[in-house]
Amino acid sequence: MDTMESTKILGGVCAALLVFMLGGWAAEEIYHVGGKGHGHGDDHVSGYPIEVAEAVEAESAEPEVTLEEMMAMASPDKGKKVFSKCKACHKVGDGEHGTGPSMYQVVGRDIGSVNAFEYSGAMASVGGVWNAESLNAFLIKPASYIAGTKMSFAGLKKGTDRANVIKYLETLN
């Protein structure tokens, strides 16, 4: 390779680098959102601000429904449909256990008290009674309510779904 070819290669690399740098500078000038410099410091704004004051006001205007109100409107039939998510692990017959304990007469029963079922240490040590309040709190996200539980269920996010399931569980006597 002679000097002329080396010069051409070096010139091509420098030209590509120059085009790359000029492209970055042009993009910065066209799309820069504000502030000084290259977006560092307190003046930096990432993206374009979107006003959402109306959406926040609309959310706060909604009345919060209590558990008692949800339970008054709950339906055991709807709860049975929602409970289908639980059937993979829980049975509803007396003494019938799956991966989880039987849900027969669970409302009013002591937490972690079925003798024929081996609970996790966390569940066995909780204490208390399964009532509407404790079931509601547990069904939001079981792992948050009882840290260390073996139950890997993600939870029921909708309050109406939880109330319907609790109403259905109350019928299992």
Image (cartoon, grey):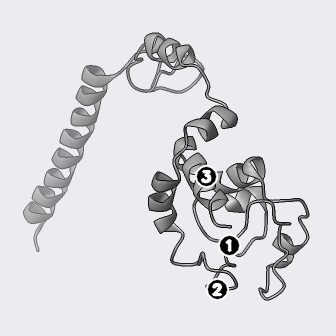
Residue highlighted by disc 2: 96
Q: Quadrant of the N terminus?
A: bottom left
Q: Any mark on residue 160, and which?
A: none
* Kind of residue at badge 3: Lys
Q: Is mark 2 on a helix, strand or loop?
A: loop
Q: Which of 125 and 67 is in front in this view?
A: 67
Question: How dense is the environment of label 1, judged by Cα within 10 Å: few (below 14), some, or many (20 and up)?
Answer: many
For marks 2 and 3 on the same chain, the one whose residue lies earlier in the sequence: 2
Rendered location of residue 172, percent (x, y): 64, 66
Residue highlighted by disc 3: 167
- The image shows residue 167, relative to residue 74, as above or below, that is below
Q: Is mark 1 on a helix, strand or loop?
A: loop
Q: In which quarter of the image is the C terminus?
A: bottom right
Lateral position of residue 170 relative to residue 120, left or right: left
Q: How far apart are marks 2 and 3 (CA)?
A: 20 Å
* Kind of residue at badge 1: Tyr
Task: Name the residue: 91% across, 64% down.
Answer: 127
For marks 2 and 1 on the same chain, the one whose residue lies earlier in the sequence: 2
Rendered location of residue 150, percent (x, y): 71, 76
Rendered location of residue 64, percent (x, y): 62, 25
Q: Nearer the viewer, residue 82 or 78?
A: 78
Task: Name the residue: 42% across, 17% down.
Answer: 49
Q: Distance between the residues labelled 1 and 3?
A: 13 Å
Task: Name the residue: 59% across, 78% down.
Answer: 91
Residue highlighted by disc 1: 104
Lateral position of residue 82 relative to residue 6, left or right: right
Lateral position of residue 169 relative to residue 20, left or right: right
